[in-house]
Amino acid sequence: MTTGFPSHITTAVEAIDTIISFAIHSRASDIHYDPQRSDSCVRFRIDGCVVVAGYVPRRFHDEVIARLKILSGARTDLHAIPQDGRWTYDADGSPYQMRISFMPSYHGENAVIRILPTIIDSDISFARLGFTPDHVRSIDAALHKTSGMILVTGPTGSGKTTTLHACLTLKAREPLSIITLEDPVEYEVPSVRQIHIRHNYGVTFASGLRSALRQDPDVIMVGEIRDADTAKVAIHTALTGHLVLSTLHTNSALEAIPRLTDMGVDHYLLASTIRCVIAQRLVRIMCQACGSSGCDECGNTGYRGRSVIAEVCEVDDGMKRLISERASISKLVDYACTNGFNPISDDGNEKVEWGITTPEEVTRVLYE
């Protein structure tokens, strides 16, 4: 890709401004600043893939790291242990939340910066994210329930948080009390009370959820179900008249059932609470300017932007009965498929047929 970096960088401040401004211009979600023997390599994650953006002379590396620590509130006198920080960066009047992680490495400290818009797009919708009309109908039906649980599953980087915030944006239009528990808070959602998980103060997802129940909520978003304690409290919350939104790390929608039972949740409780499970990935969209052949618009990658490919499983009465009977995952899948469920691979293939993405991209996110 064309880096846009100047041929000569004269100060650490210039290096940081150049890196961040070009990263935002390039639609990067992350910046990797890695020291090497003779220079510091700058890489951007764009549309899910990491690409080299440019290099900064090695003599500026320590100054750049020190300046980033000052900006983010990290300690400048600590070099041998990992640190985290954050600050707000203004790009032409648009504020961005910059989350940074420092880590000691062989040639010195490296830094990885996550770039997040301070306020999520108020026009975000499931259709814009790439969900099909059938998916949207299923998700909307689950969101119209006053209690139960909606789960979004997939690996790290599959867009689960964005989908949850699309759910929140929709529910925030209703006269409801909404609370989120996030680690960390990534997007600001107007009229929603957002709570940052602080493990060092004993505020975990489980303890935060127990406290949130005393705040008169109608809807609670739990950033991630990571352990048995959080799973059990979330299920109890969904059973007692609250709508719970959360994420889980599984490869498919129906694998959420054995994952939660492995955490100690009883089958009959799952059958009573789960309304809908979404499994998703993000595929790169073919560049509309060049048709995937590569041009300046897409940085010669052939892709620009990303779309969801997904499977959405509604838990109806028949599915509830099978879950209560401890049916195997294969029986759950067979039942779902006979009742209109389409696996995520089908959605990927359809998006290839529609010219949205390529077969190689679907293969990359599903099978590699």
Image (cartoon, rainbow, N blue to C red):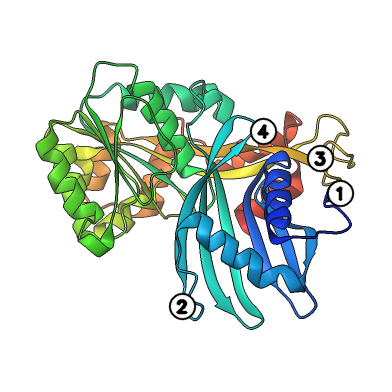
The one nearer the camera, 89 or 46, is: 89
At label 1, the amino acid type is Thr
Q: Earlier in the sequence, mark 2 or mark 4?
A: 2
Quarter of the image with the C terminus in it: bottom right
Task: Estimate how packed mark 3 is, as few (under 14), some (14 to 19) or many (20 or more) residues with alpha carbons within 10 Å.
Answer: many
Q: Which mark is residue 81?
A: 2
User: Disc 3 designates what residue?
Assistant: 298
User: Disc 1 designates what residue?
Assistant: 2
Residue drawn 56% across the image and 31% down it: 129
Residue drawn 19% across the image and 46% down it: 209
User: Disc 4 designates what residue?
Assistant: 350
- Residue 212 vertical position relative to residue 251 in the rendered view, above or below: above
The one nearer the camera, 105 or 231, is: 105
Q: How many numbered marks have been drawn onto this rendered protein structure?
A: 4
SS class, disc 1: loop
Distance Cα–Cα, label 4 vs label 1: 32 Å
At label 3, the amino acid type is Cys
Residue drawn 80% across the image and 78% down it: 38
Numbered disc in front, either 3 or 2: 2
At label 4, the amino acid type is Glu
Distance Cα–Cα, label 2 vs label 4: 47 Å
Numbered disc in front, either 4 or 1: 1
The one nearer the camera, 273 or 224, is: 224
